[in-house]
Amino acid sequence: MILSASRRTDIPAFFSEWFFNRLRDGMIRTRNPFNYHQVNQIDLYPDDIDCIVFWTKNAQPMLNKLDMLNEYTYYFQYTLTPYSKAYEPNLDDLSHRIETFIKLSERIGKDHIIWRYDPIFLSDDIDLGFHLRMFERLAQSLASYTFRCIISFIDLYNTTKGNIRDLNILEMDDKLNRSIGRELVSIANHYNLEMHTCAERIDLEDIGISHGRCIDDKLITRLTNKPIDTVKDPNQREECGCIKSFDIGVYNTCQNGCKYCYATRNHQTSLNNRCKHDPLSPFLIGNSTDGDQVRIKNKENQTYIKF
């Protein structure tokens, strides 16, 4: 079983205490985001979990707790982007985020941390030259501490259009994306970094950028030294190459405040949900309620319903 922690929120940055409490208790409960009372209970003992994939923009709160992961295989999808407070209002200074990335890599090894430079977009104050300068700075800083960079181009979701209305973010097309990709991969190659795309329809193989799998069976096989028997995740977009996993996050809970984020409708909603967080609860937000139907997932891949 592969755990995704999480596409829906930044667990390392904001909910690490809760996550490690869940490891101690050996289980976690998650609600179906489209069916409130449908609950999955997932066993979290080391024998139950093939790999944990963390997604974050700030792993600082986890650095002093990493020993608790010694019996688990895991890696980080770590986003470092250079945008201003207008786009990413609650992120720390970029230099501090680079320092944290490096500290994490020094602890867990460069094969366990992947740099994400996404989403890529253009606006009135962000042009191609900005991306080339900042991508080079980041690549130079991180080249000794990771082996791969994943990029994606911005998708203007209905849930985010209101948040970015005043930022004048431009529509991107394949011609423009290809032009940007060609410039970035040239820099990545200079620093011996693999480059992959994330859930992109456009094919950039001819310029040296592969379709990526953020939850990657090949990488997991390499890290665990055993084959992973799994399939493409049916809950993700057609363009997504990720293999099947269980996501333990909750939408509208991240406090980073990134205006382009598909997982957060608005910052106030996230603040309201954060008030419902109990680090001792089996749920990230809230607790058990009347009417919950709990499906228990164990290491034998069996489920049964508990009322």
Image: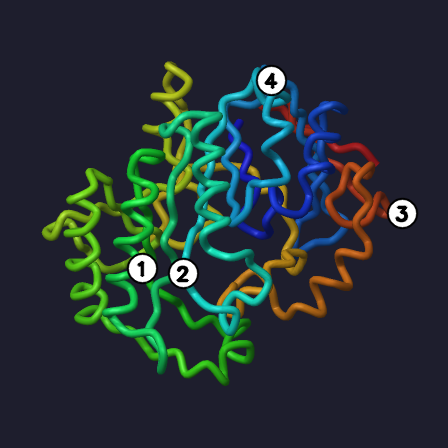
- Earlier along the polypeptide chain: callout 2 or callout 4? 4
How far is disc 1 from disc 2 in space, using C-alphas?
7 Å
Q: Which residue is mark 3?
A: 290
- The amino acid type of the residue labelled 2 equals Pro
Do the residues bearing badges 3 and 4 touch, measured as CB atoms within 8 Å?
no
Mark 4 lies on a secondary structure that is loop
Q: Which residue is mark 2?
A: 82
Closer to the camera, 222 or 32? 222
The residue located at (39%, 78%) in the rendering is: 169
The residue located at (67%, 38%) in the rendering is: 16
How far is disc 2 from disc 4 in space, using C-alphas?
36 Å
Nearer mark to the viewer, of 1 and 3 = 1
Q: Which mark is residue 46?
A: 4
- Earlier along the polypeptide chain: callout 4 or callout 1? 4
Q: Which residue is mark 1?
A: 134
Label 2, residues with CA under 10 Å away: few <14, some 14-19, many ≥20: some
Do the residues bearing badges 4 and 1 touch, measured as CB atoms within 8 Å?
no
- The amino acid type of the residue labelled 1 equals Met
Label 3, residues with CA under 10 Å away: few <14, some 14-19, many ≥20: few
The residue located at (49%, 28%) in the rendering is: 74
User: In the figure, is residue 14 to the left or right of 6?
Assistant: right
Relative to 136, say whether 283 is above or below.
Answer: above
Do the residues bearing badges 2 and 4 touch, measured as CB atoms within 8 Å?
no
The residue located at (65%, 51%) in the rendering is: 250
Split into 4 quadrants, where in the image is the C terminus? top right
